[in-house]
Amino acid sequence: MPGTGPARPSLARALGYVAAATLVFFAAAIAVFGMISLFTDTEVVDDERLGTLAGPLAIGASGLVFAAVTLYVMDRASRVRAVGGPRATLVRAAGVGIAVLVTYPVVLLLAGLWQRLDDPGASVLHALLRPYPWALAGLAFLVVLALLPLSQAALRGHTPRRWYWENDESE
């Protein structure tokens, strides 16, 4: 019977959640990269052969992958809500983190190929041995880990209680 199953989020609501989560992801990535760079006295992308746009492109592509995979994960979580649980949330968040971890060095590899480097793989290996892509993956994991339970709670109809002056009975 249609309409009797659990409510699924509308696309607009899911896009709103993902847009907010992506903004948090970008802001946290900029802050964490700045702190790592400050404390380790290193550049985020220290291979000048890659050019000046390799770092921003890697962050931008990681953000796009974060948004796309998070939207998929939210849709999947709403479909199999009964099977979910804490373990499923951890696995979904880890999947987003791994997707972001793969995206960052792939963009740096493409930048190395674009610059016609003799050894673009060495630049990617160097980037993977640094803390920046791992911090980005950790941020993606943490943001999705916070987002999934919040979005599920909103879908179950948990809304804030109303203040006493908002009751219709008082009028």
Image (tube, grey):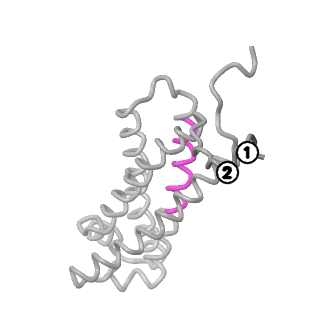
**Residue occupying the point 45% across, 85% down:** 52
Q: Quadrant of residue 37?
A: bottom left
Sooner in the amino-acid sequence: mark 2 or mark 1 = 2
Span colored in magenta: 63-76
Image spot of residue 115 (x, y percent): 45, 79
Residue type, numbered disc 2: Trp
Residue placed under numbered mark 2 in the picture: 165
The N terminus, quarter of image: top right
Where residue 19 is drawn, which disc sits there? Answer: none
CA neighbours of label 2 inside 10 A, class few (<14), some (14 to 19), many (20+): few
Q: Residue 88, how many percent across, how many down?
A: 40, 33
Q: Which residue position holds label 1?
A: 170
Q: Is residue 70 magenta?
A: yes
Q: Single out the residue that lies furthest toward the front.
A: 170
Which residue lies at the image location 64% right of the left edge and 51% below the top edge?
Answer: 15
User: Would you call the spot at circle 1 few (<14 residues within 10 Å), some (14-19), or many (20 or more)?
Assistant: few
The image position of residue 29, as x and y in percent, is 41, 69
Position of residue 141 relative to residue 28, above or below, is: above
Picture layout, residue 98 above or below residue 57: above
Q: Nearer the viewer, residue 15 or 65?
A: 15
Helix, strand or loop: magenta stretch? helix
Residue depicted at 31% across the width and 69% down the height: 132
Mark 1 lies on a secondary structure that is helix
Residues tagged 2 and 1 counted as in contact (Cβ below 8 A): yes
Considering depth in this image, is 46 or 67 the residue closer to the camera? 67
Distance CA(mark 2)–CA(mark 1): 7 Å
Is residue 126 found left or right of 69 in the rendered image? left
Count of number-bearing discs:
2
